[in-house]
């Protein structure tokens, strides 16, 4: 086990002891869209930070071989001894790979080794269930687990959908951005039918949204009417602050606390949390 992982495990144990009784229900959300550049990673990092501000225990899982979430939260992917790749291959436990970021978020990180692991998983038994089984070992320690899916509909995304309670679909508020949603919905339908019958669609989260334009508003209307999907509100505004945050290795809630982008994710987190308490 690497030094970072050892430190994380010690700190997680201390935090668990201090918090008292663990909650019995954990909500796992797959943030998915096979189209790149729609703010999946930004959503996972920002929503996770917002939930943590609300005193929720949060685990983020990086399922992209590029390790964008890992890098964005200040962890150098190349310095890691154990990642989600080893967890999926069954050579390490999730608790041995989890690290703690500067924002205080717990992260199951990724690096390029996940690409090789994905190729290996294709021919292995139970490939779609491996993430769920691995997370079951640590699930009681968290209120929320957020899965950052890669921009594909391959083994890793299907595994995330198999492990999740619900799917959140970030979509850039532009005409071409929602053309692949139907394919994602087909994949979700197949996962429901054959693997995870309880999987729900939380809805579409509009990102890079400019509410001043009629075009952006029309895109949301088209998404709602074409796919009959709920729209998660508020929409996330377009701002350069989201691009600046990863360079510092923090979420926008740390780098620009009072910015409208940070406030939007705080409101989304509050709405999601309120909805979960009603179930």
Image (cartoon, rainbow, N blue to C red):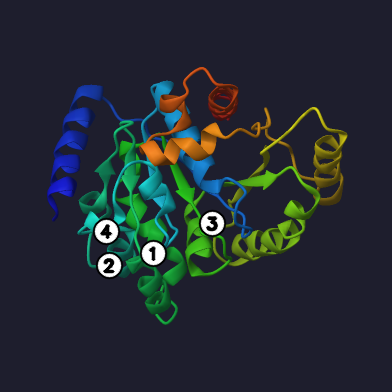
Q: Cα distance, mark 2 to mark 4?
A: 20 Å
Q: How far apart are the two marked residues, 3 and 4, measured between alpha carbons?
A: 27 Å
Q: Nearer the viewer, residue 97 or 113?
A: 113
Can residue 76 be seen here? The reply is yes
Q: Are marks 1 and 2 in contact (CB under 8 Å)?
A: yes
* Quarter of the image where the C terminus is located: top right
At horizontal 53% and vertical 40% (from top left) the residue drawn is 43
- Which residue has dot 4 on it? 78
Residue 162, horizontal then vertical, whole percent: 51, 59
Residue 51 visible somewhere in the drawing: no
| Mark 3 or 4, closer to the camera | 4
Residue annotated with mark 2 = 90
| Marking on residue 254 | none
Any mark on residue 161, and which? 3
Cα–Cα gap, marks 3 and 2: 19 Å
Q: Nearer the viewer, mark 1 or mark 4?
A: 4
Q: Is residue 4 above or below residue 64?
A: above
Disc 1/disc 2 C-alpha distance (Å): 8 Å
Q: Which residue shows up at 67% across the image and 60% down it?
A: 184
Label 1 Cα crowd, 10 Å radius (few <14 / some 14-19 / many 20+): many
User: How far apart are the alpha carbons under marks 1 and 4?
Assistant: 24 Å
Asked whether 21 or 3 is in front, the reply is 3
| Pointers 3 and 4 in contact (C-beta within 8 Å) | no
Taking the image as shown, residue 135 lies to the left or right of residue 29, namely left
Question: x, y (%) of residue 16?
Answer: 23, 31
Task: First in sequence, mark 1 or 4: give its number.
Answer: 4
Name the residue at the bottom extreme.
123
């Amino acid at each position: 086990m690497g030094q970072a992982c050892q430190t994380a495990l010690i700190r997680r144990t201390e935090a668990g002891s201090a918090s008292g009784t663990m909650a019995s229900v954990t909500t796992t959300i797959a943030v998915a869209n096979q189209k790149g550049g729609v703010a999946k990673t930004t959503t996972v990092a920002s929503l996770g930070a917002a939930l943590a501000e609300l005193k929720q225990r949060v685990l983020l899982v990086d399922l992209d071989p590029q390790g964008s979430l890992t890098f964005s939260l200040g962890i150098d992917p190349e310095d890691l001894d154990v990642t989600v790749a080893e967890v999926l291959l069954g050579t390490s436990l999730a608790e041995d790979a989890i690290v703690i970021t500067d924002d205080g978020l717990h992260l199951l990180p990724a690096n390029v080794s996940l690409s090789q692991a994905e190729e290996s998983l294709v021919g292995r038994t139970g490939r779609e269930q491996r993430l769920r089984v691995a997370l079951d070992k640590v699930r009681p320690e968290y209120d929320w687990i957020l899965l950052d899916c890669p921009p594909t509909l391959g083994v890793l995304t299907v595994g995330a959908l198999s492990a999740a309670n619900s799917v959140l679909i970030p979509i850039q508020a532009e005409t071409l951005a929602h053309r692949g949603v139907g394919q994602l919905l087909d994949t979700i339908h197949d996962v429901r039918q054959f693997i995870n019958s309880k999987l729900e669609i939380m809805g579409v989260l509009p990102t890079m949204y400019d509410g001043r334009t009629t075009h952006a508003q029309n895109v949301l209307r088209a998404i709602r009417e074409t796919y009959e999907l709920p729209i998660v509100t508020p929409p996330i505004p377009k701002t350069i602050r989201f691009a600046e945050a990863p360079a510092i290795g923090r979420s926008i809630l740390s780098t620009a606390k009072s910015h409208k982008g940070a406030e939007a994710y705080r409101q989304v987190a509050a709405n999601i949390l309120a909805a979960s308490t009603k179930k």
